[in-house]
Amino acid sequence: MRKLACTLLIAMAAALVGCVTINVYFPEAAAQKAADRFIGTVIDQGAAPAKDAKPAQPAQPAQPPAQPSAMLLDLLVPAAQAAETPDIRVQTPAAEAIRGRMQARFAVTLRALLDAGAVGFTRDGLVAVHDAGKIPLSQRAQASAAVAEENNDRNALYREVARANGHPEWEPRIRDTFAKGWIERAHAGWYYQDASGAWKQK
């Protein structure tokens, strides 16, 4: 009888695991918060936060002891618990180096180009020349170089954030999240592309 009960329990556990699907979903809200922090330190020249620390959680009331079936499920699918508190890691040595270059470039070149309406934010998270006529001829080569360097860093940033979070396949989602963030943080008068690629002024 005991052997039959053990066999039945194992069969039930296997059936339960077969019914549980762990989806590694993209944590959009966490990504937006992380992107907003990063973008703010570039556009507003604020200091980078010391680390991506999670806010302190309030003390939780004592939980009743878990039932054996719940404990078995937790052992078999520990990733289900990890997925409850998604977070996006943005601060790595590579991302911090990119942030430093972007902050310096923004202060020296890009802010003036954005203020003049010569450059704008694209719908894919990059920057592009919007009106070359607003750039003095003597400064066009420097402006083009700044745009190219900025785009190289932005592409590297999106790739690095996806890699740092263990999901390189998230790169397009990270890019989309940052693209929205750059446009949302754009100052009045700056140009950006809408979803169709048309230029608009904020």
Image (cartoon, helix red, strand yellow):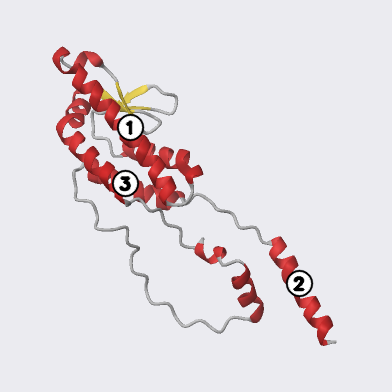
Q: Residues within 10 Å of mark 2 (few under 14, many from 20)?
A: few
**Mark pair 3, 1: CA separation:** 13 Å
- Above or below residue 94? Residue 5 is below
Q: Amino acid at mark 1?
A: Asn
Observer-nearest of 180 and 140: 140
Which label was assigned to residue 187? none
Q: Amino acid at mark 2?
A: Met
Could you tell me which residue is drawn at 14 percent across and 14 percent down? 138
Could you tell me which residue is drawn at 38 percent across and 77 percent down? 59
Q: Quadrant of residue 145?
A: top left
Disc 3 marks which residue? Answer: 94
Disc 2 marks which residue? Answer: 12
Observer-nearest of 182 and 168: 168
Can you see residue 183?
A: no
- Above or below residue 67? Residue 37 is above
Q: Is residue 147 left or right of residue 155?
A: left
- Above or below residue 119? Residue 9 is below
**Mark pair 3, 2: CA separation:** 47 Å
Q: Is residue 56 left or right of residue 100?
A: right
Residue 29 coordinates in the image, percent (x, y) = 43, 51
Residue 191 coordinates in the image, percent (x, y) = 29, 26
Lower sequence index among marks 3 and 2: 2
Could you tell me which residue is drawn at 39 percent across and 47 percent down? 32
Disc 1 marks which residue? Answer: 152
Residue 54 coordinates in the image, percent (x, y) = 35, 63
Task: Label 3, secondary structure: give it.
Answer: helix
Q: Quadrant of residue 99?
A: top left
